[in-house]
């Protein structure tokens, strides 16, 4: 006789859901050629219809069930954090195709491992509603509030291995820079122990053992966290209007 108890049935539904989410994640990873092993290119867009599944998706991400890739096809978005402690850093410059709008020069930056004190990403788009363009912002938050103050509360620190960022601008207060190699050929870079491939031979590259950045403010086409992820208090919300850093806390 089959066991139809609510607990067993719920477990089967959760198991099936995890399987579907893993299949979705695997498909995302295989959609584009990866320049450095496991990284997706900027081809996955954040879709408004997916809002209905955000709560479940957030739970899977927090549990480490999925890789995290916040990438856009043609528009940059903002990323803020109060502090990044990076280990095994490398970077190079290159041009990327931006979804039919031509190319944009970006800096591809990799960290073998990193911890962040808060994360706030804001993607702003104009959506036609009834023929009228309306501005919305998708806000993605995690960890402690991004408010310019590092409180480092227990259980709120974000950590990730294999973190990649494609940025058109990046500002912040750099510190604890060690083992710096500036001007290294872009095709010979290592992010810690792993090759950071995709750079052109003879082009500018940078490599460092450690790099910490306070008050990081970046315009980016993609933030990709692969490997082991701890992303507490993940929140994804859609709000009307154009939001900025002051709306992060």
Image: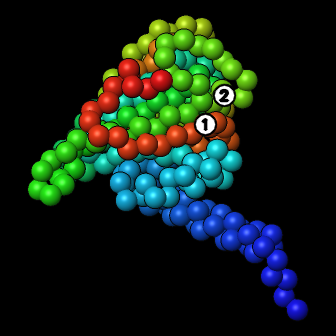
Residue holding disc 1: 233
Going 43% across and 33% down the picture, which residue do you hit? 121
Q: Mark 1 touching mark 2, by CB under 8 A?
A: yes
Outermost residue toward the left? Answer: 131
Crowding at dot 1, Cα within 10 Å, few <14 / some 14-19 / many 20+, comes out as some
Q: Is residue 46 left or right of residue 39?
A: left
Going 43% across and 54% down the picture, which residue do you hit? 51
Percent x, y of residue 45 = 36, 52
Q: Is residue 73 left or right of residue 228?
A: left
Percent x, y of residue 119 = 51, 29
Percent x, y of residue 235 = 52, 40
Residue holding disc 2: 156
Looking at the picture, tell me which residue is in the foreground, 190 or 52: 52
Looking at the picture, tell me which residue is in the foreground, 47 or 188: 47
Quarter of the image containing the N terminus?
A: bottom right
Crowding at dot 2, Cα within 10 Å, few <14 / some 14-19 / many 20+, comes out as some
Percent x, y of residue 70 = 44, 44
Q: Which element is circle 1 on?
A: loop
């Amino acid at each position: 006789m089959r066991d139809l108890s609510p607990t067993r049935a719920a477990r089967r539904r959760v198991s099936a859901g995890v399987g579907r989410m893993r299949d979705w994640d695997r498909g995302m990873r295989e959609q584009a050629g990866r320049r450095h092993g496991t990284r997706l290119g900027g081809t996955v867009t954040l879709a408004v219809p997916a809002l209905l599944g955000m709560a479940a998706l957030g739970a899977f991400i927090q549990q480490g069930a999925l890789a995290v890739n916040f990438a856009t096809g043609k528009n940059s978005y903002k990323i803020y954090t109060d502090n990044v402690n990076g280990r095994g850093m490398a970077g190079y410059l290159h041009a990327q195709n931006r979804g039919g709008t031509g190319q944009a020069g970006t800096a591809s930056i990799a960290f073998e491992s990193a911890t962040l004190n808060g994360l706030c990403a804001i993607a702003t788009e104009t959506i036609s509603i009834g023929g009228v363009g309306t501005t919305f912002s998708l806000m993605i938050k995690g960890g402690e509030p991004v408010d310019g103050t590092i409180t480092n509360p227990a259980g709120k620190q974000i950590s990730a291995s294999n973190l990649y960022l494609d940025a058109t601008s990046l500002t912040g207060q750099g510190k604890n820079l060690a083992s710096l190699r500036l001007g290294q050929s872009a095709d010979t870079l290592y992010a810690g122990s792993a090759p950071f491939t995709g750079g052109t031979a003879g082009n500018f590259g940078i490599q460092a053992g450690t790099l910490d950045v306070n008050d990081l403010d970046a315009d980016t086409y993609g933030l990709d966290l692969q490997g082991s992820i701890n992303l507490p208090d993940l929140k994804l919300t859609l709000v009307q209007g154009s939001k900025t850093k002051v709306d992060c806390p």
